[in-house]
């Protein structure tokens, strides 16, 4: 894992809790970096479920104002990564097995439809970007860099949903991105899962490139099914 620095994940020995956060200084997009830093710390487990998020501690750790921090917390709450429980204040949310199951069910349908449509469109520019994102994922897998792999997969789906004909699919999937990344970090941390994912994503890209919508849909569904099996088993434990 990585410690959070400047809103990104930096290579160093991981710490848990607020101590893992680092001041982000005074860049132009302080609010955005405060959000990125907290989101990454939740996704990679440095701030585990149930952790209380105390404003004073977070402001000191990140070097941001309460205004910037509160905006970041509001965004995280909207993405269901944190929850506000009365007088206890914000805490890192717990993703239940049932919630994860619902997410994978939605993804299976939406992503099957997404890659089916992309295969029918066979847009050269989109395919070039999709292939480049896949290549970045390949490099992350070769480096055994889980955090980078998760980050690149967000980019991969951002490219895949950029076409106008999949705008509604993009709207729904974007609402799930943070929680999908949370689950993806855990599944890809399992031995062999990154390599398996690489084969699955390659099959999707090859089917899209071949203009084969049926194969693209099947490859996408297989990818989700295998990820779901691992994630739900982890949540059972």
Image: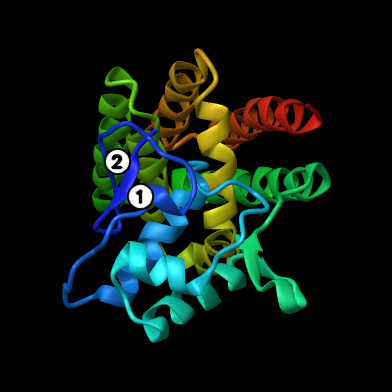
Asked if residue 234 can be seen in this view, the reply is yes
Image quadrant assignment for residue 211:
top left
Question: Is 220 left or right of 32, judged from the image as shown?
Answer: right
Q: Is residue 237 left or right of residue 178?
A: right
Residue at 37 percent of width and 44 percent of height: 151
235 versus 203 height, above or below: below
Q: Which mark is residue 123?
A: none
Question: Looking at the image, which residue is at 56% across and 33% down?
Answer: 186
Sort mark 1 into few (<14), some (14-19) or many (20+) by Cα contacts within 10 Å. some
Q: Is the residue under label 2 in contact with that under label 1 (CB below 8 Å)? A: yes
Could you tell me how far apart the alpha carbons at marks 1 and 2 are, in whole angstroms? 7 Å
Element on which disc 1 rests = helix
* Secondary structure of the residue carrying numbered label 2: helix
Quarter placement of the C terminus: top right
Q: Looking at the picture, how far across and down is residue 227, in whole percent?
A: 62, 30
Q: Looking at the rendering, in which quadrant would you find the N terminus?
A: top left
Q: Residues within 10 Å of mark 2 (few under 14, many from 20)?
A: many
Residue bearing mark 1:
155
State the residue position of label 2: 133
Residue 161 in view, yes or no = no
Which residue reaches farthest bottom?
67
Residue under the point 46% across and 57% down: 39
x, y (%) of residue 38? 43, 59
Which of the 4 quarters of the picture holds residue 139?
A: top left
Q: Please say which color scheme the image uses.
A: rainbow
């Amino acid at each position: 894992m990585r410690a959070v620095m400047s809103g990104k994940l930096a290579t160093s020995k991981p710490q848990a809790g607020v101590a893992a956060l680092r001041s982000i200084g005074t860049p132009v997009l302080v609010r955005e970096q405060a959000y990125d830093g907290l989101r990454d710390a939740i996704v990679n487990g440095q701030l585990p479920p149930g952790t209380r998020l105390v404003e004073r501690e977070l402001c000191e750790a990140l070097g941001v104002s309460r205004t910037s921090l509160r905006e970041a917390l509001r965004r995280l709450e909207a993405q269901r990564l944190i929850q506000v429980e009365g007088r206890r204040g914000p805490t890192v949310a717990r993703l239940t097995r049932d919630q994860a199951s619902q997410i994978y069910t939605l993804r299976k349908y939406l992503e099957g439809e997404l890659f089916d449509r992309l295969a029918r469109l066979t847009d050269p520019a989109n395919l070039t970007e999709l292939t480049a994102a896949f290549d970045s994922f390949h490099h992350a897998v070769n480096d055994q860099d889980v955090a980078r792999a998760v980050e690149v997969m967000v980019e991969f789906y951002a490219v895949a949903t950029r076409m106008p004909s999949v705008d509604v699919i993009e709207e729904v999937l974007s609402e799930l991105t943070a929680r999908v990344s949370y689950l993806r970090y855990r599944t890809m941390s399992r031995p062999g899962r990154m390599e398996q994912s690489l084969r699955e994503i390659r099959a999707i890209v090859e089917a899209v490139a071949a203009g084969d919508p049926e194969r693209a849909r099947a490859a996408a569904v297989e990818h989700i099914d295998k990820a779901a099996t691992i994630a739900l088993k982890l949540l059972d434990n």
